Image: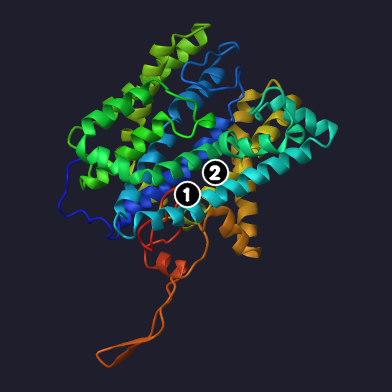
Amino acid sequence: MPNSSTSFPLQGERLPQELSQRIRFWSLVAMMSLVYVHAYNLHPRDLLPWTPVEEPFSATTYLQYFLANGLLRFRIPILFAISGYLFAHKDGSAPHIVRVLSRVRTLVIPFVAWCALGLIFVWMLEQFATTRQLVLAANIVRFDPEFPLVSNYTPKQVLLCFILAPVPFQLWFIRSLFIYNLCYPWLRTAVDRVPRLYFAVAGVLWLTGWVQPRYQLVEGSGLLFFAFGIWLRRRNVDVQTVPSWFRPWPLLGLWLALIGVKTGLAFYLKEPPVFLMSILYRTAELLGIFILWFGTGALVRGAMRQAWFIWLTSFSFIIYAMHEPLFSYVSEGVMARWPDHSFLVFALLPPVVIAAVVGVGALLRRLAPGVYALLTGGRGVRRTTPAPRPWKREGVAIKPVIISQTDMAEAGRPAVGLPLLERAEPGQE
């Protein structure tokens, strides 16, 4: 583990700029990785740790599985850990109930809005014969197997679909995140008083793939890594300094080897052993978090010096929320037309969809910033710090200053809201 540092900022203080930039970098990379995971087009499509591959073995099918069900699987744990860390960092800034109510705006409202938009989008596709076949072929609407079309849902099914199985299925993350925010006092008590017991239980739930997150309100990854983020912040652990035990090249080799072995088993065995595949999957997932967080400092610093990349980080949330179910139906249509080019579709379609989503987001933010702010929970919008009325101190009138997001960026402290994460104050992202 990283060492504790007494010079690291206390709770509520501004985060170091380098840490803020690292968080923004990995938030964007995680969202782009998510699109690639959803671009997986081999059979069966559902990617569990032990999912086999029915397609013939080839360099491209091996690489696709290696990436989608191995190398890119770091994103959920690292986002949960960052979220827990930031929520704990602002502990005491306001009563817990006030903080939870603020999360209604930043998590619950976007969740409901995108669930509704997803349902409307799919309903519209179902009104035409050609696009209805895409909906049936993609088979991502799975709330009730007897009702594969949302146009046949009853009001009760629509309500339960919102809560348990939203059509934009990736939204399970912010639903779970809100629940962990709500339960923060209990999680904080657990990691403060009985950390070994808590992490032992949460670790087993995570290792065994306790529940499928799309259909459950809590799951193993969040219980473990959100609490881990809380523990890091409560213990004042310096997460920027590379720990003494970290050896990037041997760990990188081990990480790639584990993913390679797991991928080979998925092709070689018709029914890969669940326990073995889970161990390989989770071990690689954990290694990937440490390797990417501590071994890519130069890459992060280089990217965050680029104005275009900083601009792109402000669209992390819109990429996350908007790419599904759009991507699944576009992918299904493209694969139906070019069934023999699965790897090209996997490699080239995600950048096209990401560019389209960012373009729509940029246009919406420009033309209807209020709507954009509602859909993103205020993330990535130009905002100002509310200024109090002019007041006097020792007889000197003080004029309040409104600091815009652009001003903060020019000062080297970007103020773009984080995707999915605890909303940070200016300079604290």
Quadrant of residue 323 within the rendered picture: top right
Report the residue marked by disc 1. Answer: 419
> Looking at the image, is mark 2 or mark 1 earlier in the sequence?
2
Q: Which quadrant: the N terminus? A: top left
Residue 27 versus residue 131 in the image, above or below: below
Residue at point 60%, 37% (across, down): 166
Q: Is residue 215 visible?
A: yes
Mark 1 Cα within 10 Å, few/some/many (few <14, many 20+)?
A: many
- Residue 146: which disc? none
Residue type at mark 1 is Pro
Quadrant of residue 338 within the rendered picture: top right
Question: Where is residue 344 shown, x and y percent of the image?
Answer: 63, 28
What is the C-alpha distance between the residues marked 2 and 1? 8 Å
Outermost residue on the left side: it is: 6
Question: Where is residue 106 shown, x and y percent of the image?
Answer: 49, 53
Q: Which quadrant: the C terminus? A: bottom left
Outermost residue on the right side: it is: 129
Residue type at mark 2 is Tyr
Residue 93 versus residue 150 in the image, above or below: below
Residue at point 60%, 13% (across, down): 55
Residue 108 versus residue 333 in the image, above or below: below
Report the residue marked by disc 2. Answer: 320
Q: How is the image coloured?
A: rainbow
SS at mark 1? Answer: loop
Question: Where is residue 53 shown, x and y percent of the image?
Answer: 56, 14
Q: Are marks 2 and 1 in contact (CB under 8 Å)?
A: yes
Mark 2 Cα within 10 Å, few/some/many (few <14, many 20+)?
A: many
Residue 40 versus residue 295 in the image, above or below: above
Residue at point 70%, 39% (across, down): 155
